Image (spheres, rainbow, N blue to C red):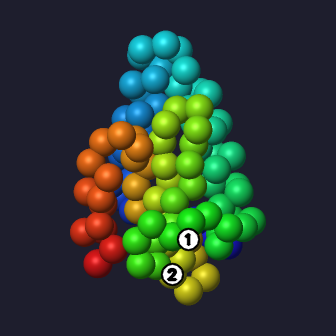
Amino acid sequence: MKIIFHELARGEFRNAAIYYDDQAGLGDDFIEEINHGLQQISKHHKAWPTIYPDTRAYQIKRFGFRIIYCIDDSEIVVLAICHCARRPLYWIDRLK
């Protein structure tokens, strides 16, 4: 399935990668983990738990992030790339 990013999710992804690169030189590792998660979601989009109606989350264990996504017809929409320990449902308004 085709994956598209909500505009704010794209910014979260970029900002987190920059942060990890600046702090520990791990920006490329972070990007690789997110891309791996996106590949898994693309192949098995219904395999991860529902966390909100019609919304699922793929856990990135190494960095403590989640890829929050929904399935819209033939597309996967990434709503957020969020840290698990911060503001758990801030992205809900992006469903509209």
Q: Quadrant of residue 76?
A: bottom right
Residue found at the very far top of the displayed protein? 24
Vertical placement of residue 21 versus 34, above or below: above
Residue 5, visible in the rendered structure = no
Instruction: Name, please, the residue furthest toward the bottom.
Output: 73
Q: Nearer the viewer, residue 85 or 10?
A: 85
Q: Mark 2 points at which residue?
A: 72
Looking at the rendered image, the quarter that the C terminus falls into is: bottom left
Q: Decide: few, some or many residues near mark 1? Use Cα within 10 Å; few <14, some 14-19, many ≥20.
A: some
At label 1, the amino acid type is Ile
Front-most of 51 and 26? 51
Q: Do callouts 1 and 2 mark residues in contact (Cβ within 8 Å)?
A: yes
| Residue 73 in sight | yes
Residue 49 drawn at (x, y percent): 56, 66
Residue 66, position in %: x, y?
49, 49
Binning the other alpha carbons within 10 Å of mark 2 as few (below 14), some (14 to 19) or many (20 upward) gives few
Q: Residue 8: x percent and y percent? A: 32, 54
Picture residue at 68% right of the left edge, 67% below the top = 47
Badge 2 marks a residue whose secondary structure is: strand
Q: Specify the quadrant that holds the N terminus.
A: bottom right
**Which residue is at a point 25% across and 69% down the rendered structure image?**
93
In the image, 91: left or right of 54?
left
Give me the disc on residue 76: 1
Q: Is residue 82 above or below residue 68?
A: above
User: Disc number at residue 46?
Assistant: none
Q: Residue at x 59, y 27 (%)?
A: 28
